[in-house]
Amino acid sequence: MRWSLTTSILMHAAILASALIVLPNPDAFKVEPQDTIPVDIVSIEDFSKRQATAKNVEPPKPEEKIAPKKQEVVKDVKPAPEIADEVKTAAHEPVAEPPEPKPEEPKKEEPKPEEVKQPEPDLLKELIKETADTPEPKKEEPKKAETKKAEVKPKAKPKLDKPEKKKPEKKLDVSEIENFLNKVDDTKTAPQKPADEEGAPKQGEFNMSGVDAQLAATIADALRKRLSECWAAPAGAREAQIVVKVRFSLNPDGTVQGQPQVLNSSSDILFASTAQSAVSAVLACQAYDFLPPDKYEVWRDITINFNPNMMYPT
Amino acid sequence: MEVEAVQGVAQTGGHISLWHLVWQASLPVQLVMLGLAIASVWSWAIIFEKFFVVRRVNAADDRFEQSFWSGQSLEDLYLTLGSRDTMGLASIFMSAMREWKRSQESALRAGFQGVQKRIEKVMDVQIQKEVGRVESRLLFLATVGSAAPFVGLFGTVWGIMTSFQAIANSQNTNLSVVAPGIAEALFATALGLLAAIPATIFYNKFAADTGKIGSRFENFADEFSAIISRQLDERI
């Protein structure tokens, strides 16, 4: 017994020693001072006020958007001189005055790469001079110049040393031209985009004809909050992206008048149950006594979109 | 203020190496760890001892059975074994033979009915002795196997209580406050399992071995008493 006891003790000692040696020594924990995150508690009213005002400010945006485009058009013209240089080197013509045509008229030069093909230095020189003498104001018709450029370039490609350089330029130009041509459409479509991105009432449309947008947004937010608490969308409605449009009328005391109506329809299997749940949510949430009684006409008739994705943001 | 307190805790309890786990534990946890370590050492000592005891007994039994069934006379076997220290089957045979020798004179007077009974009794006693020798201390293995996890768990519960107190004191649930206490607490459970697992495994093995050895003794005793009874009947 003594022998086995000593063996056991030795074995344990060996295991402990090897564990002390072999087992990795974990790094000590470091306590990093935690930054406090300041949190503002914003009421629904403030939030909707901000969104509403943000929406009002939006219209100037499209103009800002267009303005940089114009600049880009001008910018795009500038790189052209490089090509002009290349044309010259390709023609093996040491021209004395290369910088002259660059800033003013790079476009007129390019439309004639066919002539460059025949290496007649004098002719080229004359041409360059001609073009330099008759400077065209850029901004008058950058469209023309650009379209010309776009048309002509493919021809010039084989002749020039570095066609790769041109390609991106060309692409840019085409898009710019398109933008330019679509200028009118752009201004029309522009205001809609921001509205999608950060428009005030995300969840529902409100019939707020002639009503203060701020107040309507406040009511919308309050209703949305309330309804999202009452509404349990059936499973799968979120994936199916079902949107139920419900219209209902309210009494002055905040109770629902009559039965809410479902305005839209869908072939989706889940739509019926989703619509049913939306209607019952509207009924379950009453009375909406938090709405300001003195603005009854604002919230008498309410149309609201029940969208599971909006109600339960991911 | 809070940050300083947290750093103080972290500096004292920030390491979770094996050494720190033991030395930074609170006293009850340390006692639990010590107890479990001793239990582990002792149970391994028992395991080693039993391993060799079982092997020796089996080898001796094999040797004895070979010579017993080799056809030589029991008297010769008794004489050759008499000088040696016997174990297992040989000791059962020796006790039976000793009793037979002793009761030979009285048997001539009082008949052989009592001799048979006495020899069986003596063999039974010897079997109990031998089996008891083989399975001594096995109960300790069983105890360690069943109780060590609970002892370790006790240490864990205590350690976690301590670490919760550390959380309460520092008013911070930072991982560096919680982790060392929980690590040392879990280390107690680890030690408990470390002691319990081999103890349980080897207890089962040795329990089976002693069962086999015991039944082998019983079988031999039955066979030997059958031989003796036949010889007694032949004498009459």
Image (tube, rainbow, N blue to C red):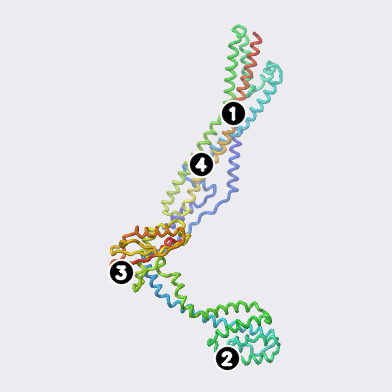
According to the picture, the residue beneath numbered tag 3 turns out to be A297
| Tags 1 and 4 both on a single chain | yes
Image position of B41 (left or right of A119) = left
Q: What chain is tagged by disc 3?
A: A
Res A59 quadrant in image: bottom left
In three-dimensional space, the C-alpha distance between marks 2 and 4, rounded to whole angstroms, equals 95 Å
Say what secondary structure mark 1 lies in: helix
Q: Nearer the viewer, mark 3 or mark 4?
A: 3
> Looking at the picture, which amino acid does disc 1 mark?
Thr
Q: CA distance from mark 3 to mark 4?
A: 77 Å
**Residue at 66% across / 80% down in the picture?**
A157
Mark 2 lies on residue: A135
Q: In the picture, residue B52 is in which quadrant?
A: top right
Q: Amino acid at mark 3?
A: Glu
* Same chain, labels 2 and 1: no
Question: Which SS class for mark 4?
Answer: helix
Q: Earlier in the sequence, mark 2 or mark 3?
A: 2
Q: Are marks 2 and 1 in contact (CB under 8 Å)?
A: no
Coordinates of residue A114 in the picture (x, y in percent): 67, 86
Q: Which mark is residue B33?
A: 4
Left of A93 or right of it: where is B204? left
Residue A69 falls left or right of residue A44: right
**Marked residue chain, label 2:** A
Q: Are marks 2 and 4 on the same chain?
A: no
Indicate which label's residue lies in the foreground, 1 or 4: 1
Q: Quadrant of the C terminus of chain B?
A: top right
Q: CA distance from mark 3 to mark 1?
A: 95 Å
Asked if residue A138 lies left or right of residue A284, the reply is: right
Q: Which mark is residue B210?
A: 1
